[in-house]
Amino acid sequence: MTPPLQARDAHPGAFVAVDWGTSSFRAWRMAADGTPLAESRSSEGMQHCAKSGFEPVLRAHLAKLGAADALPVLICGMAGARQGWVEAPYLATPAQLHALHEGAIRVPVAGDVRILPGVAQRDAQRPDVMRGEETQLLGITEPGFTGLVCMPGTHSKWVKVEGGRIVDFTTYMTGELFAVLSQNSILAHAVDAGASSTTDSDAFRAGLATATADPSDLTSALFRLRAAQLLGFEQRADGAARLSGLLIGMEIAGALRRHGGLASVRLLGAGSLGALYESALRAAGLAVTVCDAEQASRQGLCKAALNLWGS
């Protein structure tokens, strides 16, 4: 059995990597070769720290990690947002992933603490932004990588990478739409928001098929979800799966229409949501390479840190 990270090595480490999200905090004390030596995590995300302060949270976690005062810290995610700790300005597309570290900004605190930038698509017709996902992309791609990456979540991203550069991306509010519709619309009567959807669900597959066949008919299909239950054709227990299928199917149909002629995609997913997307992507005829989201964040931070401070 592999021992827990906290007990694996007493080496003081080379740097600390921090993934600071909207509602979560994850940090690792890392060896110079990229091996995680200790970890600390909590729900002290940006929303929490906007009220309580960022530096006290970081210092507390550094102490838990056993990190020496002189150890440099590299942060990605929402700590660098406008409403975060210190704003790390967006890099504009096309953005070279392996040069992300060049846009890192120093935080005015004791020690060497830096925050990686996000990426912006400064196109008036297709404006878009990401913060945190760029670091994950760095973690799962090799220099010169060309391909499409699907990153499911509250705000799913589809990212086109060419020669190791982010050249185009699109955000889909799929996860947020599921939450809003299942909790604050008429569909709250048809969907158990806490129910889990599985890849072998007939309702999920039916929702996928409906959305991919005619994504422009989505709003009608959403109402039919409620009507089918009122008329006894379907059960409320299937509501969450059908809604997931409809929304994920709409997202994939939009991405396929935008990027056309796709044969393969890298999927940055985990857990049940990752499994749903993998199933949906394969149903659309795509070859799928699955990458772990948390590992991607850690690997991306490690690559950028080694570029900053050397190996």
Image (cartoon, rainbow, N blue to C red):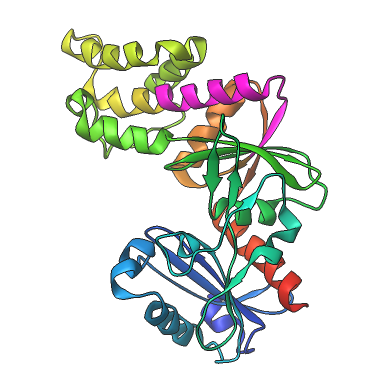
Q: In the displayed structure, would residue 208 be above or below residue 43?
A: above
Q: Taking the image as drawn, is residue 201 in sight?
A: no
* Percent of width and height locating residue 195: 29, 36
Which one is nearer the viewer's eye here, 250 or 258? 258
Which residue is painted at 71% across and 30% down in the image? 264
Q: Taking the image as drawn, is residue 197 in sight?
A: yes
Q: Is residue 291 magenta?
A: no
Q: In the displayed structure, would residue 280 be above or below residue 145?
A: above
Which residue is painted at 58% across and 22% down in the image? 283
- Residues drawn in magenta: 245-266
Residue 122: name its quadrant.
Answer: top right
Magenta stretch, overall SS: helix
* Percent of width and height locating residue 84: 42, 64
Residue 3: name its quadrant.
Answer: bottom right
Q: In the displayed structure, would residue 276 be above or below residue 46?
A: above
The quarter of the rendered structure image containing the C terminus is: bottom right
Residue 201: name its quadrant.
Answer: top left
